[in-house]
Amino acid sequence: MKNSSNSSSDNTGSGNISKLDKTPVILIADDDPSMRLVLRHSMEQSGYHVIEAANGLEALQAAIRQIPDLILMDAVMPEMDGFRATEEIKKITDCTDTPILMATSLDDDRSIARAFEVGACDYVTKPFNWSVLKHRTSRMLFAADAERKIRHLAYHDALTGLPNRMLFMDRIDQAISRAQREKGQFALLFLDIDHFKVINDSMGHAAGDQLLNVVSQRLIEVLRKTDTIARLGGDEFTIIIEDLEEAESVVLVAKNILAMLDKPVQVNEKEVHIGGSIGIALYPQDGENFGTLLKHSDTAMYRAKELGRQTFQFYADEMSQKAMQRLDLENQIRSALKNEEFTVYYQPKVNLVSGQCQGMEALVRWQHPEKGIITPDDFIPLAEETGLIIQLDEWVMRTACDQFKKWKSAGYPINNLSVNVSARHFKEGGLLKHCKKVLDDIDISPKFIEIELTESALVDNYKSAKEILTEIHQMGIRIALDDFGTGYASMSYLKEFPFDTVKLDRSFVQGLPDNVEDAAIVKAMIQLAEALKLNMVAEGVETEQQKYFLADHCCAYGQGYLWSKPIPAEEFEKIYFK
Ligand code: C2E
Ligand code: CA
Ligand code: CA
């Protein structure tokens, strides 16, 4: 076989290309000890290492243990004959290509045909012609070695000796089968060396090759033996990480690889600094075959590059992208709390008969440094889910109470401040203590303060909510049921909880006065509130007609764009306390 003239083939990283580089191991299976002795002598003379087996079964065991380079197999043996043993040995994964030379005294056609059938490469007849035997074994070893080399070249990268794309595809298929069987998952990492092209162009291809060899060597060191590392070409490496208990453990692998790339590399007696970008695709969620997984890990790798290199990225389909955005938003809310990016807007609550502003609802806003004002619908749900709402609500209550106290002290004619309180407070407790603390710190009478809750906050935490609200109510703080009419069991809740106010949901006000159904419902709700001696605030009043309808039917208060959107404190002051 021709040798590759490529200068870089010296640096083949993997020492596995030629088995002839080491002493070939010959397994001699014969039940006749004196025959084994002579064969051993002859083979050792040819420079081979010999192992022996006294029957087919022993030969099978020896093959599993030592994976010989060639087997000299006697046909007729006790326990297990040579034909059976050959058949069994061929089933061993590592021995499928091991040449087996059947030694037989039977030179009848049937036996010879059988020898080939079970997988023998060739046969020799006893008594041996020693010269023929020597030539035959030597030729078979040479052929097997050549075949191995060809296969290695076909499946490995000539520069680094790592598996190439062909073998990698094969390994992915195997990993998929295993993952399917074991209901497991695996990760495909796509690694691209940062700035490789610059080094290759400025220092020459030999330097580039050297660098790639160092990287592949380091990859082998940093990864487990069970992980497959391949070079797809250029400066692109791919890695399969199996036995992933959780997707997160691949993060550790990616970090290790990046840390190893961060160390300088010695090329042409110069120290060069490289780095890498890694994209990660997970089986099965990011793709179910080689092509998709590779494409997605590649996409993720590009995203990692965009993010500034020396970093990794998971392939994010829409789902995981959403999850990442959420995580991002969560972190942003956290730092927004720390950096005091939140602010409170106020919306007037108006007496429908006198037209006077009698109080206001505090509504939180996020003053995002880049995105500007963000309304609560875009962050409250996540803040609730993560529990950050507790901190946020407490901050809003404190800020709003502080503002209210200032207005009150300035003599403005207001008597009510509403703050919204999330359901989360009833799961975690602490609301009562917090209310007390705020009122104490700010020194404000509880009778001015009203907390607003939705029915859903109460449904899930019926018992604790009832206890907490009863205590808060006993302190003198007023309690309002928000979004009234949209809940489930309004009637019974209205009686059982210590409400002072119900806020008629905007969706019923919208259809007034023309929508007959809405009109009927609103009328009934006003009557119900009246019967239960509850204050009624209609939300979302946008038109004069809505206001008249509500006033005509004895709804006491209204809130809505008709008077004002929620606005900052200074604006509120200008409009209402001129
Ligand atoms: P909500 O408590 O029902 O507040 C009323 C919402 O209706 C406010 O939306 C307000 O801007 C809007 N609105 C008022 N009048 C009109 C109108 O005439 N037309 C229309 N189309 N909308 C009107 P916002 O400020 O975006 O707040 C949304 C929700 O976020 C609030 O609904 C409340 O559930 C929640 N929220 C706001 N601030 C806080 C807070 O500090 N803590 C908690 N836990 N939730 C808050
Ligand atoms: Ca509210
Ligand atoms: Ca509401």
Image (spheres, rainbow, N blue to C red):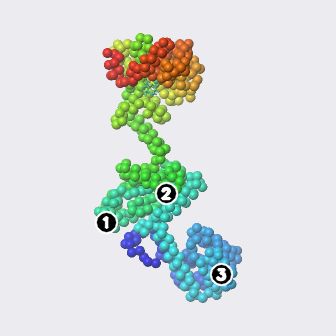
Name the residue beneath numbered marker 3: 112
Residue at 63% x, 77% y is: 116
Estimate the x, y position of residue 13 in percent, counting from the top left.
43, 67
The residue beneath circle 1 is 204
Can you give x and y, in whole percent of width and height, for residue 424 in the image? 50, 29
- Any atom of ligand 1 within 8 Å of the CB at mark 2? no
Q: CA distance from mark 1 to mark 2?
A: 33 Å
How far, Cα to Cα, is label 2 from label 3? 46 Å
Labels 2 and 3: the sequence-earlier one: 3
Res 409 seen here: no
Within-10-Å neighbours for mark 3: few <14, some 14–19, many 20+: some
Q: How many C-alpha atoms fall within 10 Å of the one at disc 2: few (<14), some, or many (≥20)?
A: few
Q: Position of residue 454 (x, y in %)?
A: 51, 25
Q: Amino acid at mark 3?
A: Ile
Q: Nearer the viewer, residue 365 or 89?
A: 365
Q: Which residue is mark 2?
A: 291
Left or right, residue 210 beside residue 540:
left
Q: Is residue 123 above or below residue 520?
A: below
SS for dot 2: helix
On whether ligand 1 comes within 8 Å of the CB at mark 3, the answer is no
Label 3: state its secondary structure: helix
Q: Single out the mark in the foreground, 1 or 2.
A: 2
Q: Give the CA separation, mark 1 to mark 3.
A: 58 Å
Percent position (x, y) of residue 337?
39, 33
Does residue 494 appear in the picture of this structure? Answer: yes
Callout 1 amino acid = Gly
The C terminus: image quadrant: top left
Identify the residue shown where x is 56% and y is 81%.
137
